[in-house]
């Protein structure tokens, strides 16, 4: 059995992706690297719990509690939790008070419980209440804009908003795209060339680090259960 993820894009500038899933007979999955922060709620033995997960700079094995429902918001790059220093959440997370009666408390703010369909409204509320903040320079630079500031200033904005440098983010996102292309049947040599890897060994090292599996494991479907991976 596998965990079936249901995910969707969002038109909100605060959100990259909204996802949900339910665990079954899987007790472990590979949590692949991500440059994004994620707000997630899950129901464990009838009680809803709430946490934020920071960027993950490498793939790691993650336990999966049985018969548990999850709903998550993958925040857009440049969007982060205001009151938690970014460096504290790189490769880490923070759990908040358990949800109660359909509401949750995050850093002193009482908010509606996150749902798959109402993620955008919750994100706007989080921004309005100052729980999350958005650095537009990060998203603009990632779209190709060249601001009239120094490279050091751009790097400072990225590290402050994401906990990662621009180079680290690009490496992670490129590996995720490579993994998706290989899983959908693209020739491995073409993926390496099209995404700018030096050669196939360079691609392999990147996949091992950020995805936790080789190109052949991804191609043959023997990589096991992965966390949320979708076409960018």
Image: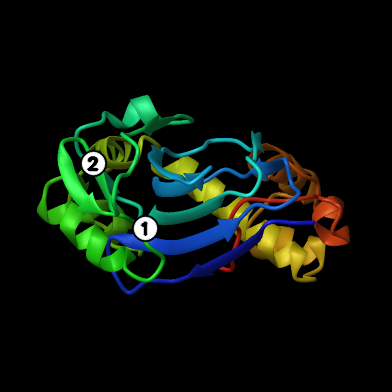
Q: CA distance from mark 2 to mark 1?
A: 32 Å
* Residue 219 position in % (x across, y down): 83, 60
Q: Is residue 116 above or below residue 171?
A: below
Residue at horizontal 64%, vertical 38%? 59
Answer yes or no: is residue 135 visible: no
Answer yes or no: is residue 94 visible: yes
* Residue 48 position in % (x across, y down): 41, 45
Quickly name the residue at label 2. 105
Quickly name the residue at label 1. 142
Secondary-structure class at tag 1? helix
What color scheme is it? rainbow
2 vs 1, front mark: 2
Mark 2: few/some/many CA within 10 Å (<14, 14-19, 20+): some
Seen from the viewer's position, the closer of residues 161 and 106 is 106
Q: Is residue 176 above or below residue 230?
A: above
Q: In the image, 117: left or right of 108? A: right
**Upstream in sequence: badge 2 or badge 1:** 2
Q: In the image, 204: left or right of 112? A: right
* Residue 113 position in % (x across, y down): 31, 55
Residue at horizontal 21%, vertical 51%? 111
Secondary-structure class at tag 2? strand
Seen from the viewer's position, the closer of residues 46 and 126 is 46
Q: Residue furthest top?
A: 88
Seen from the viewer's position, the closer of residues 178 and 110 is 110
* Residue 167 position in % (x across, y down): 46, 42
Quarter assignment of residue 92: top left
């Amino acid at each position: 059995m596998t965990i079936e993820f249901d995910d969707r894009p969002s038109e909100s500038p605060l959100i990259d992706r909204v996802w949900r899933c339910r665990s079954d007979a899987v007790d472990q999955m590979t949590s692949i690297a991500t440059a994004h922060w994620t707000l997630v709620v899950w129901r464990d033995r009838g009680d809803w719990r709430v946490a934020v997960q920071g960027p993950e700079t490498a793939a790691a094995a993650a336990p999966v509690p049985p018969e548990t429902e999850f709903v998550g918001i993958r925040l857009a790059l440049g969007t982060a939790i205001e009151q938690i220093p970014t460096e504290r959440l790189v490769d880490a997370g923070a759990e908040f008070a358990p949800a109660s009666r359909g509401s949750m408390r995050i850093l002193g703010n009482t908010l509606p419980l996150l749902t798959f369909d109402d993620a955008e409204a919750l994100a706007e509320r989080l921004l309005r209440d100052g729980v999350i903040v958005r650095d537009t320079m990060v998203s603009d630079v990632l779209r190709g804009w060249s601001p009239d500031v120094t490279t050091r200033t751009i790097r400072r904005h990225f590290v402050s908003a994401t906990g990662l440098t621009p180079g680290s983010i690009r490496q992670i996102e490129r590996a995720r795209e490579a993994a998706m292309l290989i899983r959908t049947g693209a020739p491995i040599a073409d993926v390496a060339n099209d995404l700018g890897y030096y050669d196939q060994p360079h691609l392999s090292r990147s996949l091992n680090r950020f995805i936790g599996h080789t190109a052949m494991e991804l191609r043959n479907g023997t990589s096991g259960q992965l966390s949320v991976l979708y076409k960018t």
